[in-house]
Amino acid sequence: MRPDPDRRHPPGYRARQGLNWGVVGLMYTSYYLCRYNLSLANKSIAAEFNFSKSDMSSIISAQLLAYAIGQAVNGLLTDRLGGKRAMIIGAAGTVVMNIAFGAASFWGML
């Protein structure tokens, strides 16, 4: 006789699991899409700072290299810290850096 699937977990477990997966999925999607920002803005950046196509290709290559190195380093770091702690640190860091960059561009520091 098989146990009732609804009886294996306490009440509210499935709803909480769905909420957790939704939040984690949204954070991961946000992190993943952050790497596409430069390619969308590169024409405007090149025009504002008088960068040549060669300059922009060097910047984009450096970005992709940093992203690749970051994947390896952050993967090893996440293995040590644990997934929950790494996601919280990453989310907090993303919020802080977005506010800092927004404030710097608003006040003309960049």
Image: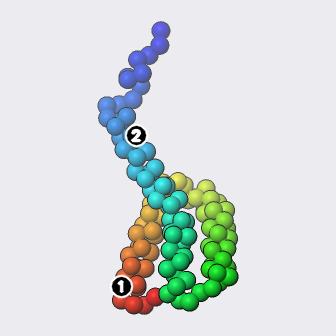
- The residue sitting at 40% across, 46% down in the picture is 22
Nearer the observer, 83 or 69: 69
Q: Disc 2 residue type?
A: Gln
Q: Please indicate, yes or no, whether residue 62 appears anywhere in the rendered image.
A: no
Query: Which residue shows up at 40% across the image and 84% down it?
Result: 105
Q: Secondary structure at mark 1?
A: helix
- 57 or 106: nearer the viewer: 57
Q: Where residue 64 sits in the image (x, y, percent)?
A: 64, 69
Q: Residues within 10 Å of mark 2 (few under 14, many from 20)?
A: few
Q: How is the image coloured?
A: rainbow
Which mark identifies residue 106? 1
Category of crowding for the residue at label 1, using alpha-carbon neighbours closer than 10 angstroms: few (below 14), some (14–19), many (at least 20)? few
Q: Secondary structure at mark 2?
A: helix
Q: Report x, y in % for residue 58.
A: 67, 79
Looking at the image, the residue that sits furthest to the left is 11
Q: Which amino acid does the dot numbered 1 rest on? A: Phe
Left or right: residue 20 versus residue 47 is left
Compared to 47, does 77 lie above or below?
A: above
Residue carrying label 2: 17
Residue furthest top in the image? 1
Circle nearer the viewer, 2 or 1: 1
Q: Nearer the viewer, residue 105 or 5?
A: 105
Name which quarter of the figure residue 17 lies in: top left
Q: Is residue 53 visible?
A: yes
Q: Earlier in the sequence, mark 2 or mark 1?
A: 2
Q: Is residue 63 above or below residue 1?
A: below
Q: Quadrant of residue 59?
A: bottom right
